[in-house]
Image: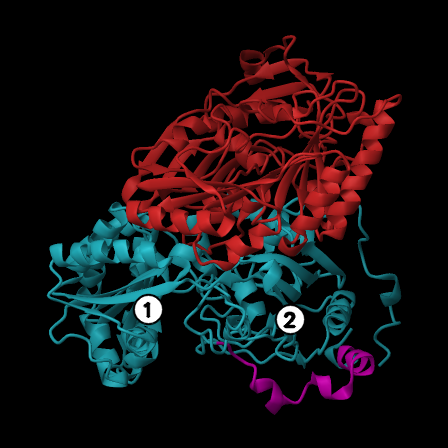
Chain colours: A red, B cyan
Amino acid sequence: MSVLDDLAVKAGDDDVVCGVPARFVAAPAGTEEAAALIAAARDLTVVIRGGGTKIHHGPPPRDLDLIIDTRRLAGVVEHAAGDLITVVRAGTPMAELHALPGQQLALDAPPTATAGGTVSANASGPRRLRYGTARDLLIGVTVVRPDGRIARAGGKVVKNVAGYDLGKLYTGAQGTLGLITECVFRLHPVPPATAFVRAAAPPTAVAKILAAQLAPSAVEINAGPGAATEIAVLVEGTEAGVRDRAAVLARLLDGEVSDVPPSWWDTPPWPPDGLGLKLTAVLSAVPALVEAATAAGATIRGSAATGVLHAGVPSPGRGGAAGGDDTADGAVTEPAAEMSRLVDTLRAAATRAGGHAVVLTAPDGVREGLDMWGPVPGLELMRRVKERFDPDRRFAPGRFVGGI
Amino acid sequence: MSIDALAARLRAEMGPDQVLTDRQQLRTYECDGLAHYRVAPALVALPRTAGQVATVVRACADAKVPFVARGSGTGLSGGALPHADGVLIVTSQLREIVSLRPEDERAVVQPGVINLQVSVVSKEHGYYYAPDPSSQQICSIGGNVAENSGGAHCLKYGFTTNHVTGLEMVTPDGDLVRLGGAAPDTPGYDLLGAFVGSEGTLGVATEVTVKLTRLPETVRTLLAAFASTDQAGAATSAIIAAGVVPAAIEMMDALSIEAAEAAVHCGYPVGAGAVLIVELDGPVAEVAAQFDEVSRLCDENGAFETRVAADDEERQLIWRGRKSAFAAVGRISPDYIVQDGVIPRTALPEVLRRINEVASSHGVRVANVFHAGDGNLHPLVLFDSQVPGEEDRAETVSGAIIDLCIEYGGSITGEHGVGVDKARYMPRMFNDTDLDTMQLVRCAFDPDSLANPGKVFPTPRLCGERPGRRSGPHPSHEPGVAEIF
């Protein structure tokens, strides 16, 4: 237990995951050290924490002995600009990766979020329309398995079909398969020019944007109960190209060209203590989903041209949705039951839209009673994968789909 | 269970004409696109529905007989090479486009549907299917899923894995399972991401949901001729450094140009030591600005002639030489090996020099064709099998090229797959723990190693116990019962 003795310190007041306090916290500084730590912690349950921006997403852990803090596993190992790739340690803040010289990791995330956490949470933002998500941009990965062994998959070249693409398996796995210690990302050039086109327009206008061959980088929607729906489009490219395309889009939507995004751009539509969901839909069903969700009292924001939306509802009795929008009124006697019904309503709407509803966060006292992940296809195979990687179910127990 | 018993079961459960055991008929399927590996399967199954694929796999699972799935058989790594004691499941009769939904930017297709067909039927709606392997006129979507196929335009648009959002598959137990869906980001492990590119070792895809991509407003194609591959490589670097992401950047060297001229008379500039094909697509306003920059960068890096395709016909002419290059090499050499490796793009000039050194030290000619934008090399190693020793020397050079790819931090395969051909190189790219970790996934899907065994991984490993699952013989196969036929 020496590595554990060296690295682990007693947990503090903030070392709590969804109401479950940890006993210890350890922050390894390298892959080898992390491997030694995990091997020594074979009797402990573990939750991995990066910048902590999404640590409260998902169900609480069934049990929690040790938080592995990745923030000492930080730094850009290599930035091969000519090859448009970077190798980074998992605890590197996304702020560093958004501003590499002349290039960027085109993955929207809060600046204090870490690379590894963003991958593990499969977080995405407006620009997923153009650049895809973590699964598309992660080309190589180093992990420490729950048994403490170090494994690599993928590599440092974008085009590579040698062996299984384990990076995809670890993307969105929420730390249930072990610790990501290093990521290799595909980069994109920073576009010379950008513009936003903002308009008050219904969700059905998104189809017009997609029909025009203007290659927008993001098409975001903001809709709430009783409020006019807004659409904002990001255009990136050359100076001349962006000017022309933005002008065409502005005419198409009867909107305005702006240098800056609206205030709601890439911000979650729920207050810190509210209910937050991720809703997905096939494209043609996005308008119906937006309508159903706003009718149920939710504020909707997100990528209308990819079918990935966020829904937010304030905590019962608090009033006022994020961004100061109004919300449905109504006396609340049993907040947990009401929120549970609301989740059911939104999940039914997302299912009708061909997608899913996942509860990301919920107020204390409500979270425990919710089926946060909802039904998932292929669950039996997922259990078998978990069983192979983490037979003792030590990593983030209970935090993933189907109680994994 | 013997193969005879398995054949009887499948004939009863599917139909007599869907099961082949005749020696002559089996030989039709003895190889895929990598024709120097040949193995006749014990049985060929020709299912017509997803349910029939499940029937076949279930029968194989019960009998512990290995199975190999095959689409159009165009693969270049022997991924669909049959197993001598196993069943070959041919998916080419599953060729229905189940639904075409441009309003959702999705199509649902059966695995035997031909890649190009998806684009053809989508075109009238203003869409296409982006992954475009050179074999797209004959290769199947199911095969593309198995191999994670790329193509010239994956530099900008990505590979099959970036364009598949859902699958129906048969697990090696014979269960029909759905992974992903039409909407993005299905919750749970991205098993779809693990399945795509797993070369048939995790099960058989029976239905594939693919993304449709909006056709670009304009496409512009430029051919630039240089004195040397060094110059063409420098131009490629300059284009990337300028922040331009073309749809494709392809390079051919003097020997491959010579072959293409001999085969299809593509009329590339005389005296070129290398040509670059650069294609830009997107909104007119964007492409116009970038095209001027690309032209300038080619000129600055020594292009002695540039041609711009004025219309679709001229574009096809420019591409004809490139697309025919593999087959064209047959005009200048009786035999050749198509290699597929990847290097960091910036190492291109150095690696090309070293390939030439290795080739000349063995007295072997190598024609180079590559996706220059992403460092994916396709050296064509020429030999004459009638000349004693030449084939061995060609194999040596071909292997040395893969070693160079590994040395420079690249990959042993960019798009053709590992298959049977490169399994032996996997330990040079991955250590034992890396391979063992991939096996964890394999064992979760296929604990008995029945799905395409002997491919991808160099040595078969046992999965140990199946946690929480049945072990030992299936109850219906207790001694004596299954062998009475």
Whether residue A69 can be seen here: yes
The residue under label 2 is which amino acid type? Gln
Identified at 56% across, 63% down, the residue is: B145
**Tag of residue A269:** none
Gap between marks 2 and 1 measured at Cα: 37 Å
Q: Nearer the viewer, residue A136 or A247?
A: A247
Span of residues in magenta: B6-32
Relative to A87, B74 lies left or right: right
Q: Residue B125: horizontal and vertical position, in percent?
A: 54, 69
Relative to B385, B365 lies left or right: left
Q: Chain of mark 2?
A: B
The quarter in which the N terminus of chain B is drawn is bottom right
**Tag of residue B110:** 2
Q: Which quadrant would residue B308 be assigned to in this image?
A: bottom left
Whether residue A42 can be seen here: no
Q: Residue B332: horizontal and vertical position, in percent?
A: 24, 82
Relative to A339, B53 lies left or right: left
**Magenta span contains residue A358:** no
Relative to B166, B149 lies left or right: left
The residue where tag 1 is placed is B395
Q: Nearer the viewer, residue A80 or B269?
A: B269
User: Who comes first in sequence, dot 2 or dot 1?
Assistant: 2
Secondary structure of the residue carrying numbered label 2: loop
Kindly check if marks 2 and 1 are in contact, taking CB atoms under 8 A apart as contact.
no
